[in-house]
Every structure is written in C-alpha cells, then in structure tokens.
C-alpha cells in the first residue's frame, strides 16, 4: 500500500520503518522550538533520546509477538514501526487457541518485564518512592528535579507500564481484544467472537476519545481513532463474509445463454448483446463453442471502437468451480486469481458463470469497498 523501508533483521525478523515515520523528526523539531528563542538544541537532543527509547520499547513489544510466534511454529513475516506504535505481521493464524493467546500476550508481557527491570533500580535511587508516584501521575508536583538517569528510569518504568496495560484493554485490534476473541472462538464461534471483540473496540475507542479530550492529549485521540476504525473495518469485513456464506451460489449464477459473443466478433456486435442484458461481464467463446474468456461492458464502452475486433478486449483467464461450491470460497478464489469470474461446471458441461460484479451488487456496495474489505489481510497488531 504505502512504502516502508527495511532497516534490518532483528533476531532474524525483517524490521521496517513506515514512510510516515518521517513525521517523527519533524515533530521533534516542532516540540523543541520556542517562540522568541528559536530551536533549542538541548531540547532536540532530549526529545531525540526519548523518541529512540520509546521506539526501543515498542520494538521489544513487537519482538515479543514475533519471536513467540516463531517459537510456536507460526511464520512472523515482519515488524513495521509507525509513528504511533508498531505491528508484527503474522499472516497465518496459529492453529491452537493457546498459541494465539500466547503470541498476543507476549507483547505486553515483554513490556511488563522491562518495567519490572527498571522498578528496583528506580526504587534504589534516593527518593525513589516519590519518583515513581511522579511518573505515574506526571501532572503532580515534584519538589526535587530528577537527574538524567532517574528521568530515563522513570520513563522506562511508566511507559512500559502504560504500554502493557493499554494493549491489554479488551478492544480489537489491541492485543487484549485479540486474546478475548481467541478465547471466545470455541464457546460462541468465530463470527460472534469477532463481533464481540470489535464492538468492544468501538465502545472502548469512543470512550478513549472522550478521555483524551479531557486530558487534551492528541496522541491518545489519534490512537483511539485507529482503534475505532480498525474495529469498524473488521466488523464490516465479518458482515460481508457472513452474507456470502448465507447466499447460495445459485442466487448469483448467470445461466449459459443461447446468444453468444465470439472472440472473432466485432466490438459493435458485443455491445449489441450487452444492450440486451443487465450483465456487466459476459463470456466469450471460440468458433468451436468452447469458453475463451470474459469481457467487461465498461472496457468495451470506454476503450474500444465499434468497428474493431473484440480480440484485444477480452480476458482469457478465468477459474472453474462446481455448482456445489460455497459462494464465499468461490469468491475468495476469484479475488485471489484476480479474474472477472468463474465458469461453473456440472459433470463435464458449463452450467453458468459467477462474476465478482454480481457479488458486489448482491452485497450492495461499491467495488472499492468490496475489494478493500475482502482482500484485507489478517491485520498486524497495531497500537504498539
Ligand atoms: Zn501487541
């Protein structure tokens, strides 16, 4: 979709920076600028160090997911870092529920570990108790200015605690929401588990937007907005697949018609046949009445001249299915093969055709929305 740059392999897991990461140095410059004074280099250094530290925590979180996936025998494709967090791309869902729970829990657990490592060192500092209270509630007052080491330790403790707790909220697409979905799969089924986790995602996301307004925190608002939109997309994707599961293949099957378009026909003749039907795609035959491929109404309307031959305008590739196939499974194959549709066979004869265009009409949505939902991969765990 959008570019990202490979920065290397960490423990063998390819790691990439998303293009929007370019906004991070920009944000550091904005934060370090003071009207009247200009750019303060000490602030640039401070915010750069803090940023590197924060992304170190996010990276540890994602490595928690990726390395646990690998340990469970599940392929971890890559880690991508975004300005507001990261994602570990795990394209195939693990077979066992326990593995899924373990993989999603490993990210927050890695942060708990980091927080627990920083805690005793922080407590060992003079006035450690005060420092911890301050970092858990930064709006409070601090009487003594902490040293650089104390500040870094405090940030390590507080940020990792927030990352662990925040990601364990039972809201899809956060780790907590995914764990909840995995646990609910067996008792109430895949689809209902997704509905519960995504609805909670929308509810908790909206609540977080309100909370972030109260705090005046734009980063939290943006993260909450992501949670709401990811949940809405996943909910919608589930609805689309459910509709296709419920529909019989026969409902969108276009029967073989007596009037046929031949590969040797002119564009004008093909257009004349399209004028007699509401079909957006029609089959094209060779002179022995064997199926040659499919042609689309829009392509002929926009790109072809009337007196031309049809030959350059039809697509010779298609897939085949049987009348007993499930519509969802067949649509998955059509979309994966990137073709107009499928020829449906019974015994050795073609009995009709299923076109994606008809499936899109059945779902009553725009082609762009259809493909966006249908091809969205098992999404990476965003947030952090
Ligand atoms: Zn995570």
Image (cartoon, rainbow, N blue to C red):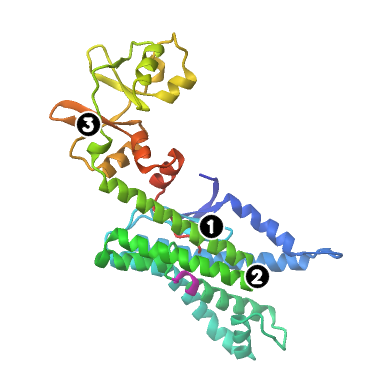
As drawn, is 20 to the left or to the right of 363? right
| In magenta stretch: residue 168 | yes
| Mark 2, other Cα within 10 Å: few <14 / some 14–19 / many ≥20 | few
Q: Residue furthest left?
A: 347
- Between circles 3 and 1, the one closer to the viewer is 3
Earlier in the chain: of badge 2 and badge 1, it is 1
The kind of secondary structure element at disc 3 is strand
Q: Does the magenta stretch mainly form a helix, a strand or a loop?
A: helix
> Going 27% across and 43% down the picture, which residue do you hit?
329
Q: Residue furthest front?
A: 276
Q: Which residues are magenta?
A: 165-169
Disc 2/disc 1 C-alpha distance (Å): 25 Å
Residue 24 appears at what percent x and percent y?
Answer: 65, 58
Q: Which residue position is annotated with label 1?
A: 81
Report which quarter residue 267 is drawn in.
top left
Earlier in the chain: of badge 3 and badge 1, it is 1
Q: Which residue position is annotated with label 2?
A: 216
| Mark 3, other Cα within 10 Å: few <14 / some 14–19 / many ≥20 | many
As drawn, is 300 to the left or to the right of 345? right
| In magenta stretch: residue 198 | no
As drawn, is 344 to the left or to the right of 217? left
Earlier in the chain: of badge 2 and badge 3, it is 2
Report which quarter residue 250 is drawn in.
top left
Task: Kindly identify which numbered label has been placed on residue 344.
Answer: 3
Residue 187 appears at what percent x and percent y?
Answer: 25, 67
* Up-down relation of residue 60 to residue 292 (above or below): below
């Amino acid at each position: 979709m959008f570019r990202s740059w490979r920065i290397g392999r960490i423990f063998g897991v390819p790691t990439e920076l998303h293009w929007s990461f370019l906004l991070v140095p920009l944000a550091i410059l904005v934060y370090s600028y003071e009207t009247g004074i200009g750019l303060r280099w000490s602030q640039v250094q401070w915010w750069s160090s803090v940023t590197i530290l924060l992304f170190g925590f996010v990276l540890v979180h994602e490595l928690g997911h990726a390395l646990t996936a690998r340990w469970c025998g599940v392929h971890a494709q890559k880690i991508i870092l975004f300005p507001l967090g990261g994602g570990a791309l795990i394209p195939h869902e693990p077979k066992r529920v326990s593995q899924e729970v373990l993989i999603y829990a490993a990210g927050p657990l890695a942060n708990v570990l980091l927080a627990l490592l920083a805690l005793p060192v922080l407590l060992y500092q003079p006035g450690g108790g005060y420092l911890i209270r301050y970092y858990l509630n930064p709006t409070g007052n601090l009487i003594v200015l902490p040293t650089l080491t104390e500040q870094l330790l405090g940030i390590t403790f507080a940020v990792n605690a927030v990352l662990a707790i925040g990601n364990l909220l039972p809201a899809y697409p956060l780790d907590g929401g995914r764990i909840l979905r995995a646990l609910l799969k067996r008792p109430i089924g895949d689809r209902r588990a997704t509905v519960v986790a995504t609805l909670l995602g929308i509810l908790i996301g909206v609540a977080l937007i309100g909370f972030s307004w109260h705090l005046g925190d734009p980063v939290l608002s943006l993260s909450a907005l992501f949670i709401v939109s990811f949940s809405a997309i996943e909910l919608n994707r589930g609805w689309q697949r459910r509709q296709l599961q419920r529909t019989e293949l026969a409902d969108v099957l276009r029967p073989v018609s007596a009037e046929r378009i031949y590969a040797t026909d002119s564009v004008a003749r093909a257009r004349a046949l399209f004028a007699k039907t509401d079909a957006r795609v029609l089959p094209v035959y060779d002179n022995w009445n064997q199926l040659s491929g499919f042609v689309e109404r829009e392509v002929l309307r926009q790109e072809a001249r009337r007196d031309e031959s049809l030959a350059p305008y039809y697509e010779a590739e298609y897939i085949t299915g049987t009348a007993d196939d499930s519509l969802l499974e067949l649509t998955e194959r059509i979309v994966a093969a990137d073709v107009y549709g499928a020829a449906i066979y019974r015994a050795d004869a073609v009995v009709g055709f299923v076109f994606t265009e008809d499936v899109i009409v059945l779902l009553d949505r725009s082609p762009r929305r259809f493909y966006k939902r249908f091809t969205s991969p098992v999404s990476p765990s965003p947030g952090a």
